[in-house]
Image (cartoon, rainbow, N blue to C red):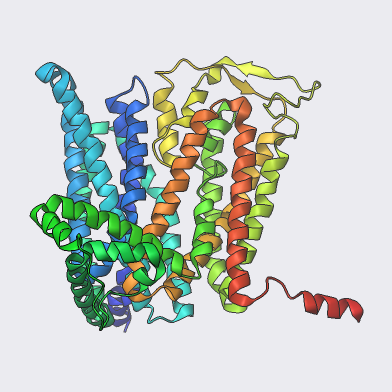
Amino acid sequence: MCKGNLKNCFTSLSFLVYSSHALSCWGDRMWSFSVGLFLIEIAPENLRLTATYGLLSGIMIFFMGAIIGNWVDKTERLKTVKISLFIQNSSVIACAIIVAVYLTWKTEIVDTWNGFGDILSKIAIIGLAVIANLASLAGNISVRNDWIVEISERDPTKLAYMTAALRRIDLAVKLLSPVLAGQLMTYISIVAGSLFIAVWNFISVFIEYFLLHKVFQAVPTLATKKKSITAGAEQQESNNVEGTSNSIEESTESPQLEAMKVSSDDTPPKPDESSPKACSRLAKHPLCMSFFSGIFTLYNGWSVYLKYDVAPAGFGLALLYMTALGFDNITVGFAYSQGITESILGILMACGALIGIMSTFVYPRIRNRIGLSRTGLISFSLEIFCLTFCLMSIIAPGNPYKFIKYPHLIEKTAASQNNASMAIYNITSTTSSEFSAHSNITSTTVAPENVKKLSSYISIGLLMGGIITARFGLWSADLTVTQLFMENVEESERGVVNGVQNSLNMLMEILKFLLVIFISETSDFYILIIISYMFICFGGISFARYSLRARGHLFHFEKVCACSKQ
């Protein structure tokens, strides 16, 4: 009996889905943590290489999000997973091997071809890392935003529990995976860490595909419905190629109609004199055709995204990415520059992760009681309320800002904590664990100012306390908006819509980094706090706009008035 139950547990659909997701998240998180360390180790003299990687990766995701999503929509589900897994893992393996070779024979490579070998190696490393990120985006859109809807049988309650479980796994892996990679690189070597990642990805790609293939076989709708959509998409593609110039002309007049409808009406489109010539010229130049097709897909993707009523909710979620009030390298670095030790920062980051995991347990139950829209309103409101403590930290005792001081509090400099406050603006990625490693490395290469040890930690305490408690509302809001898209977006357009959403999120990330470049002094960090708080408030307003349209009201004021009269 026990053996039978154990076998059923390991072969259940939920186990297969969660296991494949855990493997995928572990590889992604370990790689995103390690790639920043690799780039710092390759070029320790400055942060230009890491900044180049971060900026290039963000720009590519912004421009390619809709195109990748459109490809996911038009490709069979199992084929999408197969291609994305192969490209992602092969890119990571190749990049990790190049890193190991470069670090082992660095002197010889730098001297090769008068330094051209060094440049070529760095281009290959950054290029492969960016390709891996784009392939990971395709896999995430396919499995997390498309497969999961069919696996949950389109049941909103089951979907809520499954999305919460997937997010819980992601947060737990985000907390644990850097530990393994960090221990390998600290106690063995960076080269050993890179080779371990290469071996891990080589083994895990087969296990991931095996698990997802089992899921695909267990859920018939994953195969049947996507086939019809793919056939329709191919027919639409051929129609679009035949009438490219005329389609573009019509889309400028009615973009929403163009996004919702294939131009295959009974009445043929009005012929354009220049259309045959243009099409014949494009047909002779496949590269030009591919270029204009990509632009059309990008434009069409944004049009499709904006036609949905949930677009304001998605925009509200994207605005949450334009913030320095999170456990990323910016805020963690600022806290470190104010005298918070590495061990305390590690504890605070763990507390934030635990609060986020807690929200994944509570979210499905709240949603079952009050619905998605109300859950989103409460989540955004809770995050805004908690981040109000961050605003209070600007004027609290112990603040490092110039415009308000408390004379009775004496600031003491601690030369022993001499570390780079400039490192808080290390533009690599938004994972806080990456910064922990970056700060230790860059401290030996940058000549910083002395870190302040304040006699009052009220200000920094309010800042970190607000950020930690806001994790609950943040992840609840993320789960709410994610499920809104899953329930309201048509099956044939899930990929392109979620691709545009990822592009919006990345746009806000890029905006954040550009803002930090211009506001780069720790004494001006309060400006980042205020701007971040404003963007999060705007995000809440954008979601409230969606809720007002969907429900017709935000709060039951008539019930409040009735109770007051009684």
Q: What quarter of the picture does the C terminus occupy?
A: bottom right
**Residue 293 in view:** yes
Q: Does 372 sit above or below residue 98?
A: below
- Is residue 427 shown left or right of residue 196? right
Using the rendered image of the protein, determine whether residue 23 is visible from the camera's viewpoint: no
Vertical placement of residue 286 versus 96, above or below: below
Q: Residue at x 26, y 42 (%)?
A: 129
Which residue is pictured at 76% across the width and 27% down the height?
Answer: 404
Q: Position of residue 421 (x, y in %)?
A: 52, 24
Side (left or right) of 411 relative to 199: right
Using the image, determine if residue 202 lies above or below residue 5. Answer: above
Marks counted in the figure total 0
| Residue found at the very far front of the displayed protein | 273
Report the side of 66 relative to 477 (left or right). left
Task: Classify residue 431 as left or right of residue 243.
Answer: right
User: Which residue is at the far right?
Assistant: 566
Q: Position of residue 185 (x, y in %)?
A: 30, 34
Q: Which residue: 45% across, 64% down? A: 306
Percent position (x, y) of residue 537? Answer: 63, 52
Q: Which image quadrant: the N terminus?
A: bottom left
Q: Residue 338: percent from the left, percent from the top? A: 61, 28
